Amino acid sequence: MKPLKITLVIAGILALNSCIQKDKKTGKIAQTKEKKIGKKPNIVFLLADDMGYGELGSYGQQAIKTPFLDDLASKGLRFTDFYAGTSVCSPSRAILMTGKHAGHSTIRANGGLVNGKRGRVPLKKSEITLGEMLQKAGYQTAMIGKWHLGVPEDMSTWANGRGFDYAVQEQWGVTKKGDLLDEREHWVNNEQDSVFYNYNNYKCLDEFRTNFALDYLDEKDNEKPFFLYMSYRIPHAHEFFLSKNDLYKDKTEEWLEIERRHAARITMLDAQIKRLYDKLEKNGELENTLIIFSSDNGPHKENYHDNEFFNSSGGLKGYKRALYEGGIRVPMIAYWKGKVKEGETTNLQAAFYDIMPTFADVAGVKIPEQTDGISILPEILGKPQEKHNHLYWEIHEGGYHNSETQAARMGNWKAIRIGDSNKTELYNLDNDLFETNNIAEQNPEIVKKMNEIMKGESLKSEHYPNSGGLFKR
C-alpha cells in the first residue's frame, strides 16, 4: 500500500474511534455524534413582569392556563420560598442585575432624588452587571425587553452599554434633543427608530419580542456560550392590546373584560416561552442550557385589574409595592435537561441577589465581591447547599403603604417595618403564612433581633433620604 493511502486509512480509523463509545449499561459500542468539549453552559433567564406567586398552574392557579410552564416545572425544580429583589420593577431588576440586596442597591424605587428632584436613578458604572460578568467569562450576551435601569438621556446606562452585546429594549422619556419617545419604539443596540411595535400585527408585545430572541438564537456564534435575558412585559398593566386574541372568550359573561385580558396575556406568555424552548431544542442547545423562570415582583392592582380575582398572590398578603409575602414571594422554576432532577420541589429561602453568584458558578468564574448573595447552583443540581442567615428587603415608594418599608426574614420569622408607624410587625410564617397575626408584643427578643438586622442592612443613599438604619419619620 502506498504511503498516502496508509495515512488516509489511519486517519479514517482515528476519526471513527473518536465518534464511538461504549454504552455504560450494556457495554455495547454505539456510534454517536462527535461533541465539542469545553464549551461553558448557556444561561437563559426568563423574567415575567408583575406575575404573582399564584398565577401559574404549578403554583395553584385554577383558572388561567399555563400548560408549558407547568410542564417545565414538572421536569425541573420548583422553588416555594423564592423572593424578588423587592416589590416593584426597577429596584428589583437592579438587585437581579448586580447581586446587591435592597439595602445596598443603587436603585431602591422606580424614582429617586436626583439634583433635588424626583427622577430616574441609573446603575453606577462601578457596579458589575450580570452581562458584564458573563462577557468577561467569554459569553455572548443578549437582553431583550424591559431594561428600566438607566436614564433616557444617557445611552451608556442602557443595556447595550452595561454588558449586553445585543440589546433590544423599549425606551421612554426624552432624548438629549428633547424629542418624545414612544414606549412602543424598540431600540436595537441603541439605534433610534430601529423597530416600532405595531399592536395590530402581533397577538401581544411578547410575541414581538420573542421573534427577536428566535432570530438571535439562530444567528449567534455557536462556538461561544450565550446568556439570554428575556425581560417580558406580561402581565404588567400597561399593555392590554390583544388584537388577534380570542382566548377565554367563553368566559365573557363570567369575567370582566379586563380580567379576561389579564388571563389571556399570561396564557400567551406561556406560549411564547414554549416557542423559545422549542428553538433551543431544535438547535440542540437544551442539554447545555440552564433555564430559569421568575417574576420581578408580586401581582399588580392597576388599570382596574383586581389582583384577588384569580387569587394572583396565592392567598399571600399584599401585592406589588408591598413587602408582605404577596409583594415579594414569586414563582421560580429551574430547568436543565439531564442535570436537574425532574419534578422536585425545594423550600430553600433564596432571592434575586443569589442569581449573580449562581451564574458565576455556572460560568466557572469568581463571584463578584459586590454581591450579597450565595450560589444556589448546588440546590439546583441536588447537592449540599449553603443557606442564608436572613433575607432583607426595602422599598422607597408608596402604592401599598404610604411610606418607605423594610422587611427581613430569618428562618420562619418575618418582620415588617413601615416607616410612618415607627413599629415593627412580626409574623411566624411556619403557622401564619398569610401574615394575619402580628405577634411582635409577645416576642420582644425576636423583634429586637429583627430590628438589628434591618438597621444594619440599610446603607444610607443620597437618592433616598429615609434610607439607612431603621426607617422612621
Image (cartoon, rainbow, N blue to C red):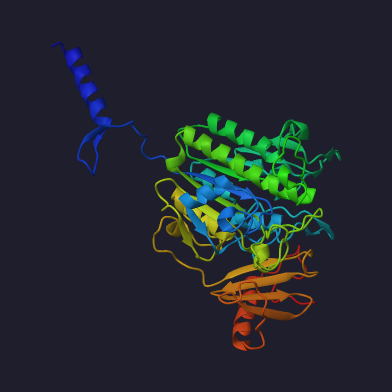
Estimate the x, y position of residue 221 in percent, counting from the top left: 50, 32
Residues 105 and 286: in front is 286
Question: 208 above or below 441?
Answer: above
Position of the C terminus, as image quadrant, is bottom right
Residues 343 and 164: in front is 343
Apparent side of residue 85 relative to residue 255 in the rendered image (left or right): left
Residues 9 and 382: in front is 382
Position of the N terminus, as image quadrant, is top left
Residue drawn where x is 66% and y is 45% of the image:
232
Question: 142 above or below 331?
Answer: above
Residue 189 appears anywhere in the view: no
Residue 142 found in image quarter: top right
Farthest left residue in view:
1
Residues 439 and 42: in front is 439
Estimate the x, y position of residue 27 in percent, counting from the top left: 19, 40
Total count of labels: 0
Residue drawn where x is 46% and y is 37% of the image:
285
Estimate the x, y position of residue 374 in percent, counting from the top left: 50, 62
Estimate the x, y position of residue 420 in percent, counting from the top left: 79, 76
Residue 445 found in image quarter: bottom right
Residue 339 appears anywhere in the view: yes
Apparent side of residue 52 relative to residue 390 in the rendered image (left or right): right
Residue drawn where x is 79% and y is 48% of the image:
257
Residue 246 found in image quarter: top right
Apparent side of residue 333 relative to residue 454 in the rendered image (left or right): left
Farthest top residue in view:
2
